């Protein structure tokens, strides 16, 4: 009895130390997240709403702000559609097939995470600019890429390339091929197998990939600034408007547009996660 009581007594400080370490770790994580995310968001909300909601609504209703957001949404929608189609194809090929150069392509997919968006815009200028490598062909076809919508879409496609692929690849790997093979043995065609067997298993990979792609496209700045030029009313996206508004000391308009962009991205991510939890119940 004495020995058992002694073990219980000596075990309590150890349990207490474990609890305090856990609480300390949680506190460090919360402080880290608060410093990097919550504090900037709080400062943005405070500065945007410091003079009330009226100036915010007035700033967001300006024609140049509306035009910038329309262009941003258009580019983001184009990006999501293209990556949904081609990103799915790339993920499928990477998982289902083995071919020379596969490891190289797998590494290149992550390049947008390592390359500065400004460098991406500059590379596109070297290709599609007035003195770019493809300038003679573009002039012959009367197509303008640099300082126009096509160049901005290309820049956004580059910086958002990994999201759809990296969401689908692990889902495809976990899904395997057994169910697809079973459908094939029952007489299903390739398209029937994809639509009725594979696609339902990939739906949350699709949704998360599209959400992250769209949110990243909304916030792109460096690449579209270089390749688009930020011409007001033509190639000025929401992020470029914020940059110009700050430069011209239109602080309320800049904070309001930044707050709206941040809220859109936050609602996209949180809404997708909430929907998945509801469906999974």
Image (cartoon, grey):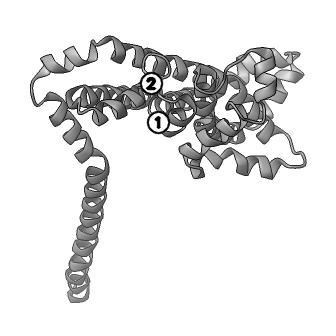
The residue where tag 2 is placed is 237
Q: Secondary structure at mark 1?
A: loop
Q: Position of residue 95 (x, y in %)?
A: 77, 41
Residue 111 placement, left or right of 64: right
Q: Secondary structure at mark 2?
A: loop
Q: Earlier in the sequence, mark 1 or mark 2?
A: 1
Q: Residues within 10 Å of mark 2 (few under 14, many from 20)?
A: many
Which quadrant holds the C terminus? top left
The residue where tag 1 is placed is 221
Q: Residues within 10 Å of mark 1 (few under 14, many from 20)?
A: many
Residue 274 visible, this angle: no
Q: Which picture quadrant has residue 243?
A: top left
Task: Give the Cα separation between the discs numbered 1 and 2.
Answer: 8 Å
189, 32: nearer the viewer = 32
274, 111: nearer the viewer = 111
Which quadrant holds the N terminus? bottom left
Figure check: 8 above or below 64: below
Q: Position of residue 232 (x, y in %)?
A: 42, 21
Q: Which picture quadrant has residue 179?
A: top right
């Amino acid at each position: 009895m004495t020995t058992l009581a002694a073990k219980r007594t000596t075990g309590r400080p150890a349990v207490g130390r474990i609890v305090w370490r856990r609480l300390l770790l949680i506190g460090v994580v919360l402080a880290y997240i608060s410093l990097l995310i919550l504090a900037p968001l709080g400062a943005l909300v405070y500065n945007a709403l410091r003079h009330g909601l009226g100036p915010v609504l007035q700033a967001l209703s300006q024609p140049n702000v509306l035009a910038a957001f329309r262009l941003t949404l258009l580019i983001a929608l184009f990006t999501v559609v293209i990556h949904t189609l081609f990103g799915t194809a790339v993920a499928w090929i990477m998982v289902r097939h083995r071919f020379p150069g596969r490891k190289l392509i797998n590494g290149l997919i992550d390049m947008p995470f390592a390359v500065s968006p400004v460098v991406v815009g500059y590379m596109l200028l070297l290709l599609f600019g007035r003195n770019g490598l493809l300038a003679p062909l573009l002039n012959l076809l009367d197509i303008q890429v640099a300082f126009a919508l096509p160049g901005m879409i290309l820049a956004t496609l580059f910086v958002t390339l990994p999201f759809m692929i990296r969401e689908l690849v692990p889902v495809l790997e976990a899904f395997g091929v057994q169910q697809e093979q079973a459908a094939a043995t029952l007489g299903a065609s390739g398209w029937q197998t994809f639509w009725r067997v594979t696609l339902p298993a990939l739906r949350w990979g699709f949704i998360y990939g599209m959400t992250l792609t769209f949110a990243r496209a909304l916030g792109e700045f460096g690449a579209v600034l270089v390749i688009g030029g930020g011409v007001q009313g033509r190639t000025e996206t929401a992020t470029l408007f914020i940059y110009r508004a700050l430069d011209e000391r239109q602080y309320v308009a800049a904070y309001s547009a930044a707050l709206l962009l941040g809220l859109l991205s936050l609602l996209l991510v949180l809404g997708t996660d909430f929907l998945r939890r509801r469906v999974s119940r």
